[in-house]
Amino acid sequence: MPEIPTEQWAQVIEKTGGPVDYKKIPVQKPGPDEVLVNIKFSGVCHTDLHAVNGDWPLATKLPLVGGHEGAGEVVAVGDLVTDVKVGDLAGVKWLNGSCLACEFCQTSDEPLCPKPLLSGYTVDGTFQQYCIAKAAHVARIPKGTDLAAIAPVLCAGITVYKGLKESGVKPGQWVAIVGAGGGLGSLACQYARAMGLRTIAIDSGDEKKKMTTELGAEAFVDFATSKNVVADVQAATPDGLGPHAVILVAVNEKPFQQAAEYVRPRGTVICIGLPAGAYLKAPVFESVIKMIRIQGSYVGNRKDSAEAIEFFTRGLIKAPFKVVGLSELQMVYDKMHKGEIVGRYVLDTSK
């Protein structure tokens, strides 16, 4: 049995709006159906910034340890846990736990459970060295996996993979990824390529153009310099009709208003990004005569998670990331505020 300390380093939000406080807190013991994971690395997601700011219509617990992309080693298990063992590698995801008994949990839609436990939001998350999670919901990570590299897959990867599945887009068809140069978008480009899809990346700047091209995008539309985004996106497809699906992972509202205009007839717009206070708007005439579908997509279920991780372990997904110490979380948030992040930041909990 590994030795478990009584105290640990963590990043704690004491009040809405922050700042985060890097300090020592007690290490908790797992309940009967829970495991304790020694978090080695944790990705930083834009959702974590929403948790700090309190700008979603969903209350956080306070004080709160944020984070929900934690990869590490199981160091303790509850008395009722039989399928996860000490020494296993595991991931703590956004959905920390669900009731497993409601209509949604029984039909593989456990993210829609009306009583969810959300890592780094309603329960303490992965910006700490030791994290509690329900055994039924931890991601199973194969031995020998690079834990820093897989951390962003545990939310960003699973989320965009789920969105691509929900879109119904088929191999050989076109998908536009809006916000393609960010943490979710960079993974969406790779999952799209691995699934046999053809990709139009929508973002701004030469750095993001270079990265998304290297990740498999066949076209890039710079929304900051384009004189007509709708026309440019449609022109990127060989027949000029636009993409079969649009994956929206942008962090502001405007792109959500444009997608219905450039998606092709019978196309699907998948909304994943959650800009604070934003609303969906689409032209009714075009939406009707083009018979388009606009749909939200949340995080993946346990099966989606296993599939998304398998893409990674097969070497098909490599999240662009930069490792910094857990103590540097505020710096990452500052860069998020300024829109300066390309790819993903991953926190090393030992620093």
Image: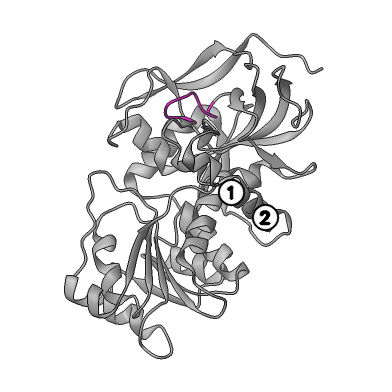
**Region rendered in magenta:** 119-127
| Magenta stretch contains residue 82 | no
Marks 1 and 2 sit apart, C-alpha to C-alpha, by 8 Å
Q: Main secondary structure of the magenta part?
A: loop
Query: Which residue in the protein does label 2 denote?
Result: 312
Rendering coords of residue 247 (x, y %)? 41, 63
* Residue drawn where x is 59% and y is 52% of the image: 304
Rendering coords of residue 233 (x, y %)? 35, 78
Query: Which residue in the protein does label 1 denote?
Result: 153
Circle 2 residues within 10 Å: few <14, some 14–19, many ≥20: some
- Residue found at the far bottom of this picture: 239
Residue type pointed to by label 2: Phe
* Disc number for residue 179: none
* Residue drawn where x is 54% and y is 58% of the image: 161
Residue type pointed to by label 1: Val
Q: What secondary structure is marked by label 2?
A: helix
Residue 227 visible in the snapshot = no
How many numbered dots are placed on residues in this image? 2
- Residue found at the far right of this picture: 1
Give 129 or 124, whichever is nearer the viewer: 124
Residue 253's place in the image compared with 141, above or below, is below
Give 89 or 295, whichever is nearer the viewer: 295
Q: What secondary structure is marked by label 1?
A: helix
Rendering coords of residue 64 (x, y %)? 43, 21
Circle 1 residues within 10 Å: few <14, some 14–19, many ≥20: many
Q: Quadrant of residue 284?
A: bottom left
* Residue drawn where x is 57% and y is 63% of the image: 191
Residue 94's place in the image compared with 279, above or below, is above
Whether label 1 touches label 2, CB < 8 Å: yes
